[in-house]
Amino acid sequence: MARVYISLGSNIDRDANTRAGIDALRDKYGLLLLSSVYESEAVGFEGDNFYNMVIALETGDDVFEVAACLRQIEESRGRDRNAPKFSSRTLDLDLLLYDDLIVDEKGLQIPRDEILKRAFVLWPLSEIAPDLMHPQAGRSYMALWAGFDKALENLEPVPFRFE
């Protein structure tokens, strides 16, 4: 079984789409480890604020099967693949980590470079996997978050009831 970490984001009907994303992942993979939910400003475009979180799970599916499942879940929530890269989203599911695998092929990058660049990915990842080591940076996510320039993004935890 592989340990997988996924970032979830939504800025369109964020409560409903965040819950729907969690429910779809739970239906497919079973037990999930959920970070807190954080609110962040849109990056790269003018838009409503996002809800962001990181989810961990275990699976026997290979890395490409997991990536395909995430795309299918996004599309089931109305994700428009023809929209500009930086635009509002009903649901955005990004495969961050798949064990300590390093992949950069077929449109798949693992570990995702956003881990080291975006507070809305690194903070929730460091919350649920503080001692896990980044497979390329060689530092724990807790250490990476401690050294992150927190002035780069406005990010706040929000109360969110998981049902």
Image (cartoon, helix red, strand yellow):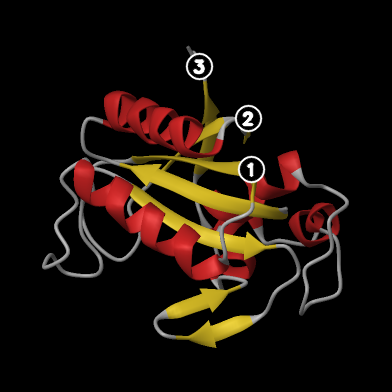
Horizontal and vertical percent position of residue 99 = 73, 63
Horizontal and vertical percent position of residue 37 = 52, 31
Q: Secondary structure at mark 1?
A: strand
Horizontal and vertical percent position of residue 70 = 39, 53
Q: Amino acid at mark 2?
A: Leu
10 Å crowding of disc 2: few (<14), some (14-19), many (20+):
few
Q: Amino acid at mark 1?
A: Leu
In this rendering, the answer to whether 106 lies above or below 80 is below
Q: Secondary structure at mark 2?
A: loop
Q: Quadrant of residue 116?
A: bottom right
Q: Secondary structure at mark 3?
A: loop
Labels 1 and 3: the sequence-earlier one: 1
| 1 or 3: mark nearer the eye | 1
User: Which residue is the site of mark 3?
Assistant: 162
10 Å crowding of disc 3: few (<14), some (14-19), many (20+):
few
> As drawn, is 113 to the left or to the right of 107?
right
In this rendering, the answer to whether 154 lies above or below 87 is above
User: Which residue is the site of mark 2?
Assistant: 31
- Point 34% across, 51% down: residue: 92
Tell me whether circle 2 and circle 1 mark residues in contact (CB < 8 Å).
yes
Q: Amino acid at mark 3?
A: Phe
Labels 2 and 1: the sequence-earlier one: 2
